[in-house]
Amino acid sequence: LVLLLSPDNGKMSVLIFPLIYSAPFISGFYNFSLALILLLVILYFWIKNNESRTIAFYIKLSTLLFLTYLAHSFTFGVLCLSLAVIIITKKGIKNYKEWLVDGIKVAIAALVPIVLGVSFVLSRESEYSYLTNEELWYQITNFKFIYSFQREPSFWVLIYVLFSLFGSVFFKAKNNLALIYIAFILFGLYFVLPDGVGYASVFSVRTLLLSFLFFILWLALQKRNKIIQYLIIGLLFFYQNYRMKELADWSVNKNNKAKELIALGDLIPENSIIK
């Protein structure tokens, strides 16, 4: 996607490194992680075929949208929001006739998953749970959407890179603004949406992760001096190498605990009831 939108910035794809081991992925939310891949694939597919959207294109789009819904309905909703923002930003909010036509076409392509999603929501009653403002800000300041294997403040390098990078382009960047709009919208929704809906939970972390994903995608597309690019690449490789060492220690620790539990299970007589 970075190479499609800004071929000269391909090296900045390394900004994705911190999300390789995200908290949802390590926690076993594999459907959500799969849906993230589909989200990026569909955005690539939409932008690449900007000038040649035939009936065949919308059939393929409909299939991809349906697969995204099957993988994770929440990510499907974020994807629809993203496409809407991209369409409106490209056409201009005043040219409502143009973006409305494209929006209707996307809505038709996504009709099946939209109907399934609405019917699912209306067919059940769910309790909503919300995090406090203190908990929400804690998750932001501690990067809770990125898994810290040793629970150490290993994100200082990441924070330095992103904020220095952001500060150098904030007043200059005028391209791919739809991506930063999406990031800000999701960041706002992070404070509004519930953290749990019935048996589904941890929506706040997922929303924050998605907001961060669009934010670093926008950052990766901004033009940079080559020296700055290589500096960022070096710092992120250093950061990722440190993370890999954390992962190795974490994996050994979890593996040893699993072996202890298995050994403990062998000591328990069959048909025992543990209270």
Image (cartoon, grey):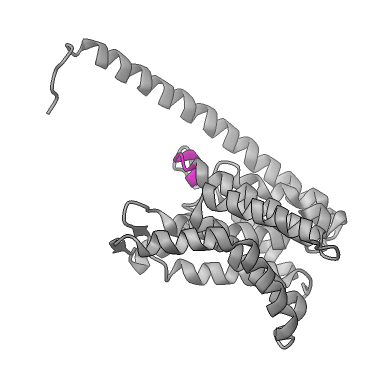
Identified at 49% across, 47% down, the residue is: 153
Picture mark count: 0
Identified at 76% across, 79% down, the residue is: 91
Residue 167 occupies quadrant: bottom right
Identified at 43% across, 69% down, the residue is: 191
Q: Which of 265 and 55 is in front in this view?
A: 55
Q: For residue 62, say whether it is visible.
A: yes
71 relative to 214 in the view: left or right: left
Residue 198 occupies quadrant: bottom left
Q: Quadrant of the C terminus?
A: top left
Residue 197's spot in the image, x, y percent? 35, 59
Residue 89's spot in the image, x, y percent? 72, 76
133 relative to 240 in the view: left or right: left
Residue 152's spot in the image, x, y percent? 47, 43
Up the image or down, 256 lies above or below 155; here it is above
Q: Which of 156 and 106 is in front in this view?
A: 106
Check residue 32 for magenta coloring.
no
Up the image or down, 229 lies above or below 242; here it is below
Check residue 26 for magenta coloring.
yes
Highlighted range, magenta: 23-29
Identified at 42% across, 67% down, the residue is: 193
Looking at the image, the residue that sits furthest to the bottom is 94
Residue 199's spot in the image, x, y percent? 32, 51
